[in-house]
Amino acid sequence: MKDKIIKWFWILFASGIGLLVLLFLLVWAIADIPSLEELENPENKLATQVIAEEGEILTTYHIENRTFVPYDELPLNLVQATVATEDARFYRHSGIDFQSLGRVLVKTLMLNRSSQGGGSTITQQLAKTLYPRGEVRSKFGMVWIKLREWITAIKLERNYTKEEIVDMYLNAVFFGSNSYGIQSAASQFFDKKPIDLKTEESAVLVGMVNKPTRYNPALNPDKALVRRNFVISQMEKSGYLTKAERDSIQAIPITLHQRTGDRTTGIAPYFRDMLRRTMSAKKPRRNAYSSQEDYSVDSLLWAEDPLYGWLNKNSKSDGTPYDLDVDGLRIYTTINYKMQRYAEEAVREHLSKDLQKAFDRELSNRKNAPFTADVDKKIVDITMRQSRAWSDRTRMMKQRGASESEIAASFSKPVQMRVFSWDAPGYRDTTMTPDDSIRYYKGFLRAAFMAIEPLSGHIKAYVGGPDYRYFKYDNVRQGKRQVGSTVKPFLYTLAMESGISPCDQVLNMPQVIVVNGDKTWTPQDHHADGSIVNIKWGLANSSNSVAAYLMKQLGPEAMVRMMHKMGIGSHLDPVASLCVGSADLSVYEMVTAYNTFPSGGVYATPMFVTRIEDSDGNILTRMTERTHAAVTREAAGKMIDMMKAVVDAGTGMRIRFRYGLKGQLAGKTGTTNDNSDGWFIGYSPRITAGAWVGAEDRYVHFVNNALGQGANMGLPIWAIWMKKVVADPTLGISEEDVFPDMGVGVPCGSLHGESVDVQEDDYFD
């Protein structure tokens, strides 16, 4: 009887083994197993890196936030922690660890001891990560999938070294918090490159692989600490650490330096969004544009700028288009990380500490807040109706099938919401109606700032608004607002090109200009006192009368041509009021046009990407600088001299007496009707920058002219930024910098009528 039992045991055992081998061969023969070619090129979804001038990572575009790291850039402690925890016999098996499988079979399945762990090797886990299982509907299906993973693991072991396998594994696994791969995880939790990870930090990350949420040190610090110390114990057990080292490392607390993976936060969010829009642009179609000029500008970009529409102009070797979120591109930008950070700080400091508080004091006394008392109720109603129609609430309710009456009624019902606030932590939780929230947001001043380098056209800083999380509209490039007196340098440049001298004298009297044959237009100017002034004084003090005088001499058509030559691409009406700033233009084109002055009359096309590489470092596109002569060097030199007077003795004087900036600086303030827009664009010999401040709607603005002028709204952002830049010796911009000699001496003596903190007169109604 005993012999019979033994006989049947071996028959059943051999049959089981035979069946397993048969099933194994069957799976090998007919299952959809990755080929060797596919194993050589696993389809990891790699994040595209956006890289600043000095190599700092501005952001990644990704579905899975993953960047590949080669084995020689992995710290030894990370590899050891991985092997010790996930697969102690990694270097002694060929993809399948039968000893571990036996342990799982006996202790886990038969004795129900779940603490004994699983039997998957690192190679099997890599196979599962690279080629996900999908939905498992039955136990037989699980067996089939497991066999596929075994076969894939064997293929991986045949074709890769152990170092390559552990490298692929660490680049493939998910660490939680939208971090795929070790590069993303090290940056996310410790703000480090993988090679710089300490043993205790590597142990934290390896510990998270098992259960990314449960062992996330930011979400569950106590559980993460226990798990980390388990990993360290495993390292000691495997001989990678001594007991003394184990005890010492386990006593170290977990210290995070976390970076957010949220696309709405981090440095340069407006720039990152603009870059994506630019690269994703499609070939322009005329019927999609309201003006011929805008269509022409984008058509020229499509034809001449390799970055514009790059994703639609280029394809991979297999003919498929590139995808920013999965193809692991490296986009090298001109953005200077420090200048960008200083720009964001300057916008935040001026708006939060000074300007918004002053504006809120004005709003507190308005019955029609945030609109001014003189705004017609019909205009307010139209504005509110448009805001409701464009809101996410309306869009989502329409998707759910809500009626127009239901949508309208919802805007009057109080709801709990989180809204933006300049107070820490940058928001506040409150209850208000959606209508009230619309008015609440309209009461916030918006801002835009851009800095560009003369001659090269490299954009160094780009801030499109106060906070991208709540105000996603890009006021640098998307927004166009009336420019006020910042338009005057274009008229004065035309004058210099036409033979008029900065020293020429004019009568400072209101100018009457005939328009449309029988009508007249006279811009207001409280500086027009009947005295004799020179042209230079007119620009320094932003005189509307001197500007109107020049417009009468030169004509609006000539001014339009000059502005287009200097890089203004938007539509410009050739009307007399253009001389005091009636045109709606963007910060992007205004700052770029002003950059012509310190460039010696050369217009440099704005450039914000230098090259694009694929995930292997091969250069796909290299950008080149594009320039053309816009005005004569002599005219540019005269304009620099006159615009220096704006800062030294005109409407920009607070740069000197309030902010204490020294050295050679030039620029121009601008204020529009009713203080709706405040501008300042200025430059030093080595950098040009401009700032705009205003509310979302032109009907929301300062009533106090002193508070609402460009010198108080836009200029402080520029000055705060410039002070930070000059104070940082690593940026190479100094108060000792001088403008190049352009063959122009100081054309005039002292200015007539010098005053302190001069206010502008910009009226074009």
Image (cartoon, grey):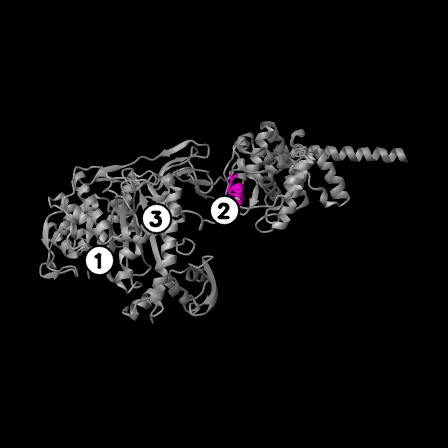
Furthest residue in direction bottom, as rendered: 367
Mark number for residue 760?
A: 1
Circle 3 sits on which residue? 721
113 falls in the magenta region: no
Residue 571 in view here: no
184 falls in the magenta region: yes
* Horizontal arrangement in the rendering, residue 126 relative to residue 116 (left or right): left
- Horizontal and vertical percent for residue 666? 24, 46
Which amino acid, by three-letter code, is at mark 1?
Glu
3 or 1: tag closer to the N-terminus = 3
Q: Residue at x 42, y 70 (%)?
A: 412
**Cα–Cα span, label 1 and label 2:** 44 Å
Numbered range of the magenta stretch: 183-192
| CA neighbours of label 2 inside 10 A, class few (<14), some (14 to 19), many (20+) | some
The answer to which quarter of the image holds residue 612 is top left
* Horizontal arrangement in the rendering, residue 609 relative to residue 615 (left or right): left
- Horizontal and vertical percent for residue 122? 63, 36
Furthest residue in direction right, as rendered: 1
Dots 3, 2 in contact, CB < 8 A: no
Q: Is residue 495 above or below residue 102?
A: below
Q: Nearer the viewer, residue 174 or 340?
A: 340
**Cα–Cα span, label 3 and label 2:** 24 Å
Q: Is residue 701 above or below residue 480?
A: below
Q: Secondary structure at mark 2?
A: loop
**Cα–Cα span, label 3 and label 1:** 23 Å
Which amino acid, by three-letter code, is at mark 2?
Arg
The answer to which quarter of the image holds residue 348 is bottom left
